[in-house]
């Protein structure tokens, strides 16, 4: 997903389309009633009303369609070697010159956001985008939700200290109380909370250190396709690990089942393998310090774990006194249609890893765990920025708003409708191999049906086509992310405040982008297809 570095990357102009995707993109729902109504998504978009109210000052008008802006030449006085010049092109040029090669989202999304509200981002070039990335799942309420802004403003106006290390404060106490009110009851009744560094990956590190300290053991169980962050221990437990210190177990994947059977039978075989590995005295695997898993693998390709498999993992670990750690960094705060993804299966883990949406768009990460595991020595896992007061205030407001307005339930209902419509779209496009997800955590895996061999149970992934779809979406004012093993899964993570009308506009633009990319992506042979397919890693999100 690289862009040319010698000149600023700018959003491509909209290509020829079968129809203009300017379905209604309404403003944020009424704050008193958001999430309390569930009108049906319309099959065809209504056009924006001509008598809509003007947007508030400084807030983009979400009802306006995104307009393509043609490529503009850099100002003549701008020096390419110095990266000078004004405007968004100069900003992009300076970013390419100054920032490290490790940057990710900036490569595939060459935009310069200047204003945002709800689903909508407005760029410095005047274009508006529907944001279905939501900070990699961080923005449960979308951009700049009024309750979040008010909570932050209240702290700023109060004169309260913004930096407090791990000292007790009224802001922290309110956050902890609200968080515990949302947890599975059995865990909340007997829980401890550890405030970590501000990123989810540090909370993963804390969870792994905690179970090793509590059990006196060192080994870990993790799963193929996992993603737990970018620090050393988190990477060891992720699917891309190269220096193996963790036992890797098969994660159930119905579409690309490692056993070639899929469905409930594939999940059952994966669970049986795990159980046999732990009980076989010759397996080479000693009793581990813990098992870490995701209830829905996000970066792995939006793969929901079957509820029966989750319950079996809980039984396997409980019977062998192995702490179960569930990474809810991306799945938490209503994203999957339940407040926490473990609630779908009724599983109560020993440790929950939480970040992203719990900070209400600001950096915050914690682990919550059974008090019996609280074997820390003072300072065993410390950090200077554990006491982010603004994030705690924003997080309290977000957690309460999602809970009070039943946005998790709303996400489940709306997500099921979107999944149904995407599957209907896939029936007309052979390149759509699978549509899957839970709630508003949705993935569309793109494949190359012409490249399937006689022994292939499913066609191979089509990363080049997925990249083309992402670019066509951006041209139409829609921001999506790629993920999965070969970056061939188009991911949708819209805010939980998404309205039916906005969902229609998103689907409209995605359908146009898919059709355009499919028409353009016609290599002459399987060899040509393989030659043009880039292998890129998903962007880090912990």
Image: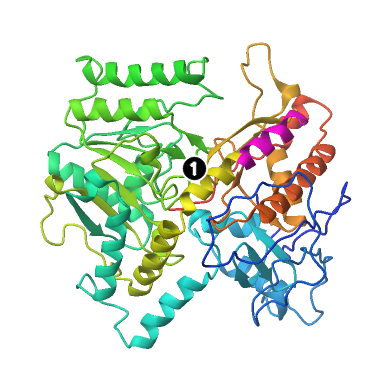
Asked whether residue 316 is drawn in magenta, I would say no
Q: Is residue 421 magenta?
A: yes
Residue 411 screen position, x and y as percent: 53, 48
First to last magenta residue range: 417-429
The reply, left or right, for residue 260 in relation to residue 282 is right
Secondary structure, magenta segment, majority class: helix
Which residue occupies 34% across, 17% down? 273
Q: How many marks are shown on the rendered structure?
A: 1
Q: What residue sits 34% from the left and 59% below the top? A: 365
In the figure, 353 relative to 423: above or below? below
On screen, residue 222 versus residue 487, left or right, reads: left
Q: Residue at x 42, y 28 (%)?
A: 251
The residue singled out by tag 1 in the image is 298
Q: Position of residue 138 (x, y in %)?
A: 48, 58
Q: Say what secondary structure mark 1 lies in.
A: loop
Whether residue 208 appears in this view of the structure is: no
Looking at the picture, tell me which residue is in the foreground, 87 or 513.
513
Residue 173 in view in this figure: yes
């Amino acid at each position: 997903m690289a862009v040319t570095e010698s000149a600023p990357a700018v959003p491509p102009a909209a290509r020829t389309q079968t129809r203009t995707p300017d379905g209604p993109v309404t403003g944020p729902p009424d704050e008193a009633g958001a999430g309390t109504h569930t009108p049906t998504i319309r099959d065809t978009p209504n056009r924006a009303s001509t008598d809509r109210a003007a947007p508030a000052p400084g807030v983009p008008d979400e009802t306006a369609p995104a307009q393509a802006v043609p490529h503009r030449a850099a100002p003549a006085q701008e020096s390419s070697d110095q990266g000078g010049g004004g405007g968004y092109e100069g900003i992009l040029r300076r970013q390419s010159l100054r920032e490290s090669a490790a940057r990710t989202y900036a490569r595939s999304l060459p935009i310069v956001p200047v204003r945002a509200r709800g689903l909508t981002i407005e760029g410095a070039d005047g274009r508006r985008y529907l944001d279905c990335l939501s900070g990699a799942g961080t923005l449960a309420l979308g951009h700049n939700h009024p309750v979040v802004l008010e909570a932050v403003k209240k702290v700023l106006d109060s004169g309260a200290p913004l930096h407090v290390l791990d000292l007790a404060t009224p802001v922290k106490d309110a956050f902890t109380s609200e968080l515990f009110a949302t947890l599975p009851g059995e865990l909340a009744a007997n829980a401890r909370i550890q405030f970590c560094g501000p990123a989810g990956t540090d909370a993963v590190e804390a969870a792994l250190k905690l179970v090793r300290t509590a059990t006196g053991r060192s080994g870990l169980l993790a799963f193929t396709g996992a993603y737990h962050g970018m620090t050393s221990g988190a990477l060891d437990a992720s699917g891309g690990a190269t220096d193996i210190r963790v036992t890797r177990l098969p994660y159930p994947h119905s579409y690309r089942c490692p056993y070639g059977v899929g469905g409930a039978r594939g999940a059952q075989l994966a669970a049986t393998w795990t159980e046999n590995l732990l009980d076989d005295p010759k397996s080479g695997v000693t009793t581990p310090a813990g098992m870490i898993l995701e209830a829905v693998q996000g970066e792995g390709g939006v793969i929901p774990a079957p509820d029966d498999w989750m319950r079996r993992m809980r039984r396997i670990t409980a019977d062998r006194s192995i702490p179960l750690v569930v990474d809810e960094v991306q799945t938490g705060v209503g994203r999957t249609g339940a407040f926490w993804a473990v609630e779908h299966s009724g599983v109560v883990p020993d440790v929950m890893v939480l970040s992203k949406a719990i900070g209400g768009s600001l950096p915050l990460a914690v682990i919550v765990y059974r008090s019996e595991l609280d074997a820390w020595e003072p300072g065993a896992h410390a950090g200077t920025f554990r006491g982010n007061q603004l994030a705690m205030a924003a997080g309290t407001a977000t957690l309460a708003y999602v809970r009070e307005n039943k946005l998790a339930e709303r996400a489940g209902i709306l997500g099921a409708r979107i999944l149904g419509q995407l599957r209907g779209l896939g029936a007309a496009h052979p390149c759509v191999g699978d549509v899957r997800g839970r709630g508003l955590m949705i993935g569309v895996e793109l494949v190359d049906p012409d490249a399937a061999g006689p022994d292939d149970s499913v066609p191979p992934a089509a990363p080049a086509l997925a990249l083309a779809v992402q670019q066509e979406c951006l041209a139409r004012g829609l921001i999506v992310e790629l993920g999965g093993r070969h970056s061939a899964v188009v991911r949708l993570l819209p805010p939980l405040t998404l309205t039916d009308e906005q969902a229609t506009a998103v689907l409209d633009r995605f359908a146009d982008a898919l059709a355009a990319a499919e028409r353009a992506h016609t290599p002459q042979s399987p060899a040509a297809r393989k030659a043009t397919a880039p292998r890129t890693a998903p962007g880090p999100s912990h």
